[in-house]
Image (cartoon, rainbow, N blue to C red):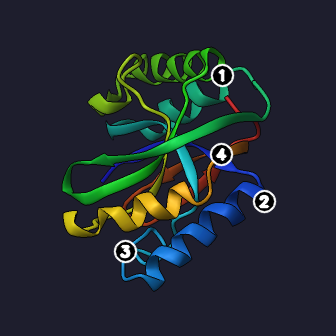
Amino acid sequence: MALALCLLLDHRSDRLVRALWERLEEDGVPTLLTHTHGHHVAHLSYAVLLAWEQEAVSSAVAGLCDGGPVAFSVQGTVVFPRGRAALAGSASIELATRQARAVEALRATGATIHRHYEPGHWMPHVSATTGVPGARVHRVVDAVSDRLPLTLRCDRAALIDTTDGTTWDLPMVP
């Protein structure tokens, strides 16, 4: 069980990612469309919390500045352990600064931040697959490459419980 602070994609960007997921599913590659609870949304996670106090986290996030919508450039595919692959985004100074501020506010609540979301270690990405066998990774790379260059835009934010997909929309984009 984890709680994620996520930026959500605008309508156009969401459609592009969902089209990628659909293509991969047609090729037999599992994506967030069919993973676990089935309530996944295309997103860019600022932070994943392994331990937290809900009220404190909600208050900390409410205290963050509204940075407004933010875009990021997808440069290619990144493959993580256990067959997870994602659209690899660039970490502009603005995006990295916003992410670091959010993590520090969350850490100040006593929350435990997953090590991959620590500032300086965080890599902006949007999940493409949830467990592709190594022999089929080329299908994911090809599917992503067919869509490059790609700029995705985030215009909303939410706290999302990864266990069941429960979402708490935020009134701003940190």
Nearer the observer, 27 or 12: 27
Q: Are marks 4 and 3 in contact (CB under 8 Å)?
A: no
Residue behind mark 3: 30
Q: Is 65 positioned to the left or the right of 22 in the image?
A: right
Residue behind mark 2: 11
Q: Amino acid at mark 1?
A: Leu
Q: Amino acid at mark 4?
A: Pro
Q: Position of residue 54 (x, y in %)?
A: 46, 40
- Marks 2 and 1 sit apart, C-alpha to C-alpha, by 24 Å
Labels 3 and 1: the sequence-earlier one: 3
Q: Nearer the viewer, mark 4 or mark 3?
A: 4
Q: Amino acid at mark 2?
A: His
Labels 1 and 4: the sequence-earlier one: 1
Q: Position of residue 126 (x, y in %)?
A: 51, 49
Quadrant location, the N terminus: bottom left
Residue behind mark 4: 149
